[in-house]
Image (tube, coloured by chain):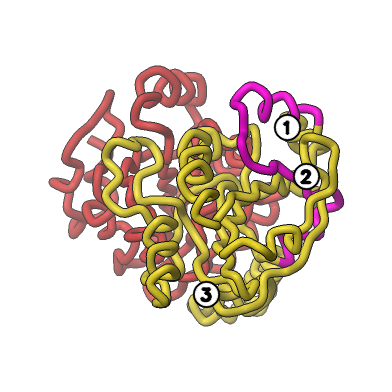
Amino acid sequence: MKKIFTFSAVILAASMLLMSATTNNEPTSTSGVEVGDTAPAFTLKNVDGKMVSLSDYNDQKGAIVIFTCNHCPYAVMYEDRIIELHNKYAPKGYPVIAINPNDPEVQPADGFEEMQVRAEEKGFPFAYLFDDGQKIYPAYGAQKTPHVFLVDNNQKVRYIGAIDNNPQEPENVTVRYVEDAIAALEAGDAPNPDHTKAIGCSIKYKK
Amino acid sequence: MVCFFLNADAKATSCTITVDSIPTFHHFDDMEFAFSLDNDTTYVINFWATWCKPCVEELPFFEKAYRAFENQPVKFIMVSLDFKKQIQSKLIPFLEKRPDMPETWVLLDQDGNSWIPKVDEVWDGAIPVTLFYKGDKRVFVGESFDDYEQLQSIIQSFF
């Protein structure tokens, strides 16, 4: 996994007293997808108990794949905005597919039953899938929750990153990255930016 | 005032707002000076938050290192990314219960995409992360520490 690799490399470098700028490590070269790559296929269990695949959305213009979860305060801050994204863009051909990547043994609040409870409470209008076995988030290279991967109708990843530029104050958002990226796709253009960074909760896995 | 001890060159005036003497920055640019101080001190800059479980779990290692390297040229800065609304209600009570915590700063800059790459190009924004540097030597650790020895060995590698 990328993080483990980075850390091991650091320890190795430290032990050899060969300090160098870690910026030499390409952030996206060790695992996961980059913009332009094919979105990894998945078939995961939805909160309604049914299996959902990315290929189920082949008749859509695309999909807004969002790695998110119950427990993370940043994920919670974006819940309403994710619902709004789906309600606005599903009719236009870009539904949200939410995926919880966390290991419930590390973060019990992110168990499948807890996901069902949260989906019910909030009335999630989109699929909320459980990455059981944690195979899918590494395939995407998701680093945190929430983390968006916008997929187009050719199953290509066209944008990776944040939903907008102000997690804590929705009223002060000035750039809506995902909405701008969809507008670009609709216009036949490449999203710009096609990659953004944002604070979030690390994905929970057993070390 | 905690901002002064960093370095004579450090822009103490950058500590524009303090809440109960915690240096608080609304814009990363105002604290960026702390990421390129050029002297013989090893700087250990950790990004964390009280709401982040793995962050809180590794704090004891930083508290131990803070004491262990007390008489060495090592400077710890714990940059809290706690929410603006929870600085008074959550962060300050948390810190009051932890007298051994190294110096804490608060960063409230919401535009992560503008400042996260300035800390390290590898960093995508998940916390915790820790940056170590002395002069031109830099080590970025993009995940939490499992034990004190991991943290200690990286600090010692700068001596």
C-alpha span from label 1 to label 2: 8 Å
Residue drawn at (83%, 37%) of the image: A105
Residue A135 in the image, given as x and y percentages of width and height: 81, 59
Residue B11 shows in the view: yes
Residue denoted by label 3: A22
Q: Which label belongs to residue A130? A: 2
Determine the image quadrant of residue A136.
Answer: bottom right
Question: Element at badge 2?
Answer: strand
Residue denoted by label 1: A115
Q: Label 3 amino acid?
A: Thr
Question: Element at badge 1?
Answer: helix
Residue drawn at (38%, 72%) of the image: A187
Residue B141 shows in the view: no
Q: Label 2 amino acid?
A: Phe
Highlighted magenta segment, given as a residue range:
A113-139
Q: Is residue A93 above or below residue A22?
A: above
Same chain assignment for discs 1 and 2: yes
Residue A82 belongs to the span the image colors magenta: no
Q: Label 1 amino acid?
A: Met
In depth, the one of B112 and B150 nearer the eye is B112
Residue drawn at (46%, 54%) of the image: A162
Same chain assignment for discs 2 and 3: yes
Question: Element at badge 3?
Answer: helix
In depth, the one of B56 and A113 nearer the eye is A113
Which chain is yellow in the picture?
A
Residue drawn at (73%, 60%) of the image: A54
